[in-house]
Image (spheres, rainbow, N blue to C red):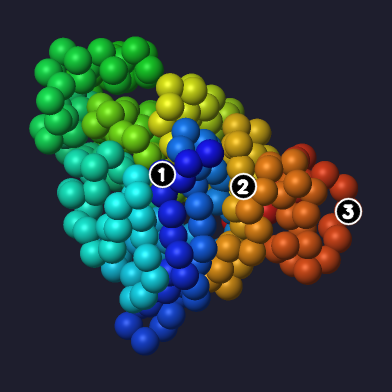
Amino acid sequence: MAAILELQDVHAAYGRIEVLHGVDLTVPRGAVVALLGPNGAGKSTLMKVCSGRMRATSGHVHLGGSHVNGAAPDALARAGLCMIPEGRGVFPNLTVAENLRLSGLAGQATTAQIYETAFTRFPRLAERYDQLAGSMSGGEQQMLAMARALVTNPAVLLVDELSMGLAPLIVRELYEVLAQIAEQGVTVVAVEQFADMALAVADFAAVMTHGRVVAFDEPGVVRRDLAELYLGGDLGGDLGGDLGRAMPV
């Protein structure tokens, strides 16, 4: 499949501390890619580079075949790349409706179309229409963050730690929505700590350690080798159960 997002030998640093040490990653158009790895592997930094929130110190980032090194986040958003950051990123002092309308300002959709997109996908948000976002549950705030992303009509959706602080049942529901979004042709890259849930909806999985992508394969292959890739040893058995849910990635 043709690549929609591609990184070639990408390096990035915070001051003098280099975090990405030559990342190579090709994301096929229309695919769901789970980005896994231990804490400190560089996953969130990689997402910042892809979304323009952080500049690569060297290497190449391509979006839809165009070189986008140094492009601003708003320019990348207009080009079709949208990111849901860790911590959800909603405006807590605005209502659900105001959050949604704000997200649609840069696009061509009418207010009615914005509401239809959000409330059809997340009926619970319609019930919270005039409620302040900060007063909602964590799961509802994550739904709002996803709805805000969807009203921009993205081609590529980057999701950083979708499950953070949420109950597994809510996480499963949100991943079902991600799978539905992908079925409509949106490319999804999801950084996730619940490895089993991410792998359940992924077409491919990438594993990062020490600032590099060390594996990229089908989910079943990555699941089988996950313990060795993380720890250099065999933890015995399938990581899809409690161990997979508990493993920090």
Task: Name the residue located 28 percent from the left edge and 29 percent from the top edge.
Answer: 153
Q: Earlier in the sequence, mark 1 or mark 2?
A: 1
- How many neighbours does mark 1 have within 10 angstroms: few (below 14), some (14-19), or many (20 or more)? some
Figure check: 182 above or below 166: above
Q: Within the image, what quadrant is residue 123 found in?
A: top left
Mark 1: secondary structure: strand
CA gap, disc 2 and disc 3: 20 Å
- The mark closer to the camera, 1 or 2, is 1
Which quadrant, please, contains the C terminus? bottom right
Tell me the residue that label 2 is attached to.
205
* In the image: residue 235, left or right of residue 131: right
**Could you tell me which residue is drawn at 43 percent across and 69 percent down?**
10
Q: Give the percent coordinates (x, y) of residue 85.
A: 36, 48
Q: Where's residue 98, x and y in %?
A: 15, 28
The type of residue carrying mark 3 is Gly
Asked if the residues shown at circle 1 and circle 3 are in contact, with their CB atoms under 8 angstroms apart, the answer is: no
Q: Is residue 171 visible?
A: yes
- The disc, 2 or 3, on the residue closer to the chain's N-terminal end is 2
Amino acid under disc 2: Ala
Three-letter code for the amino acid on which mark 1 is drawn: Ile
Q: Nearer the viewer, residue 191 or 140?
A: 191
What SS does tag 2 mark?
strand
- Residue at x 30% of width, y 52% of height: 66
- Residue receiving disc 1: 4
- Between disc 2 and disc 3, the foreground one is 2
- Disc 3: CA contacts within 10 A as few (<14), some (14-19) or many (>=20): few
Residue lying at 41% horizontally and 31% vertically, measured from the top left: 186
Residue 236: give its label: 3
User: In the image, is 81 to the left or to the right of 200?
Assistant: left
